[in-house]
Amino acid sequence: MSDTGLDLRPFWKKPRFYRSLAGLALANVVIYGAVTHRLATKQDRLTREEAALAQEIASRQEELSALQTEQERITRNDAVANAFWSEVVQPLTPGLTEAVAEIDRLAREAGVTRARTSYSQDLLAVGLREVKVSMPLQGTYFDLIRFINHLERSGRFFLVREIALGDTEGGQLNLRCDVSFFLKAVAATPAVAENAGTLLEP
């Protein structure tokens, strides 16, 4: 040091330089540690999210495969049902198509939704064929009542045999309505009778 009290030594020989250098080094270590920890934490989170997404994708693919299989089964069954209708039902009972179309028309006019309907037939001794129809229906109470009234007043003589009330969904009632109507009996040809054994896939 000089007589004036000033430290004239080079800056690298002054203690303050080393203290500043140590402070910068410590700050770099802290910053590096914080950034490294943050990056490591983020990487772990991204790895977990990637694994969760991969699992979700695999689950969705399984669901899609199951839905595709179900859709294929439904498509095959629809084709069989359509063939059965055109090749078996219609030749056996002329007028059945018109009668079912009448039921559909009455359902639309009453605002009622008709689900998949089942049919059965009995040959009567009087030369008539009784067609029994079991229809799952959905609609409001008044719409269902209107539909049943339309059936009973129809010129095709629909006979309402049984009504079974189901559950309620959002103000809509589920109903099963069993109806019969009569058609002129027609003998089935051997080919038609053979096709009557066609079954749908479960």
Image: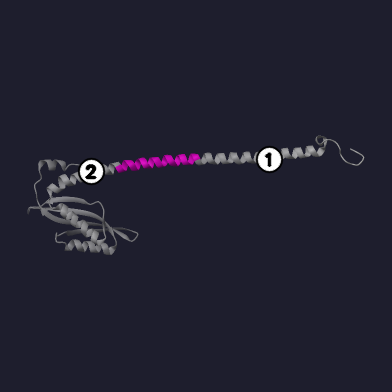
Residue furthest out toward the right: 3
Answer with the quarter of the image where residue 7 lies: top right
Answer with the quarter of the image where residue 175 lies: bottom left
The residue sitting at 20% across, 64% down in the picture is: 149
Q: Amino acid at mark 1?
A: Val
Answer with the quarter of the image where residue 16 lies: top right
Q: Secondary structure at mark 1?
A: helix
- Quarter of the figure with the N terminus: top right
Q: CA distance from mark 1 to mark 2?
A: 73 Å
From the viewer's perspective, tell me whether residue 7 is left or right of residue 136: right
Task: Check residue 67 for magenta coloring.
Answer: yes
Report x, y in % for residue 172.
31, 60
The stretch in magenta equals: 50-71
Q: Does residue 105 appear anywhere in the picture?
A: yes
Question: Which residue was labeled with disc 1?
Answer: 30
Report x, y in % for residue 43.
56, 39
Report x, y in % for residue 109.
23, 61
Is disc 1 in contact with disc 2, using a CB cutoff of under 8 Å? no
Question: Which residue was labeled with disc 2?
Answer: 79
What main secondary structure does the magenta stretch of the protein show?
Answer: helix
Q: Residues within 10 Å of mark 2 (few under 14, many from 20)?
A: few
The residue sitting at 19% across, 59% down in the picture is: 160
From the viewer's perspective, tell me whether residue 47 is left or right of residue 200: right
Q: Amino acid at mark 2?
A: Ala
